[in-house]
Image: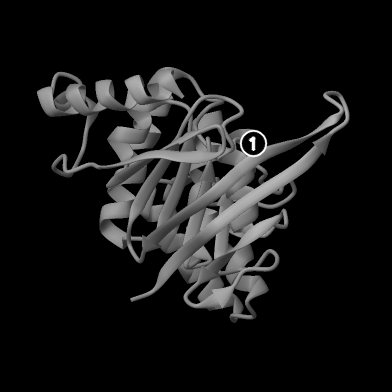
Amino acid sequence: MKSLVLRNLSKTYFDPYAGAHVNAVRDVSMTVTQGEFVSVVGPSGCGKTTLLNMIAGFMPASGGEILLNDRAVDGPGPERGVVFQSFALFPWKTVLENVAFGPKMRGLPKPECEKIAREYLALAGLAHAAERYPNELSGGMQQRVGVVRALANHPEVLLMDEPFASVDAQTRMTLQEELTRIWQERRPTIIFITHDVSEAVFLANRVIVLSKGMVLKELEVTLPRPRVWDRLIEDAAFKALSGQVLQLVRSA
């Protein structure tokens, strides 16, 4: 089975303000199998984003290794899609052209690129916005475009770094529900970075709690799907698991 494997991963850098070396990530090992949805949660400064940047290939590791389907990760690649907090859409391209960009870069014919883009826009309920430009969309709609643009490139793993942090609470809940629905339909492998405990539990099949650059705890999430906030907000199992994760984060 395809998998992403981290073995004894570490990252050390020199902090000129502190005048000392900082261990941002320390001896992290984990395996994410194909089709898993894993949330990584922890307080600010615990190494979440550094970990994601190393998996994405944006930052070299100081030690250990990253293997994607038994191949070493030593730089960015199309097999890893990334969605950041900023929408990062091309303002001069339509929504359709933005989503078709990845398939186009893979050398697919234009009709195939457009077909894939329209398929993913429909999946996210954005078919009506295909010919609009990013500045004509709300923040929530722009982030939905950013998510399906990454998925349309068919990455082997999708890395998401607090992608819903910049939208309002109601839009955030809607985006979370849409992401779980899309995941259920397509089963992409997702690693989702967040500092929000409820978000981590709501989305994932497994939650990894980071503390001071190390894995503090891994917890399985067996809540039934589809997941919608109206049902889960008062669910005893959801509350209990969220409370357990929150205690771990607060102790980190």
Q: Quadrant of residue 79?
A: bottom right
State the residue at coordinates (22%, 41%): 221
Q: Position of residue 111 (x, y in %)?
A: 54, 76
The percent position of residue 5, horizontal first and vertical second, equals 47, 64
**What is the quadrant of residue 19 in the picture?**
top right
On screen, residue 131 above or below 119: above
What colouring style does the render use?
A: one colour
Three-letter code, disc 1: Ser
- Residue 184 lies in quadrant: bottom left
Q: How many marks?
A: 1
Is disc 1 placed on a helix, strand or loop?
loop
* Nearer to us in this view, 111 or 211: 211
For mark 1, what is the residue? 86
Q: Residues within 10 Å of mark 1 (few under 14, many from 20)?
A: some
For the N terminus, which image quadrant? Answer: bottom left
Residue at horizontal 49 percent and vertical 56 percent from the top? 158
Asked whether, in this view, residue 23 is left or right of residue 249, the answer is right
Residue at horizontal 34 percent and vertical 41 percent from the top: 178
**Residue positioned 42% across, 53% down in the render:** 190
Pinpoint residue 121: horizontal percent, then vertical percent.
44, 54
Closest to the observer: 121 or 221? Answer: 221
Left or right: residue 92 versus residue 131 is: right
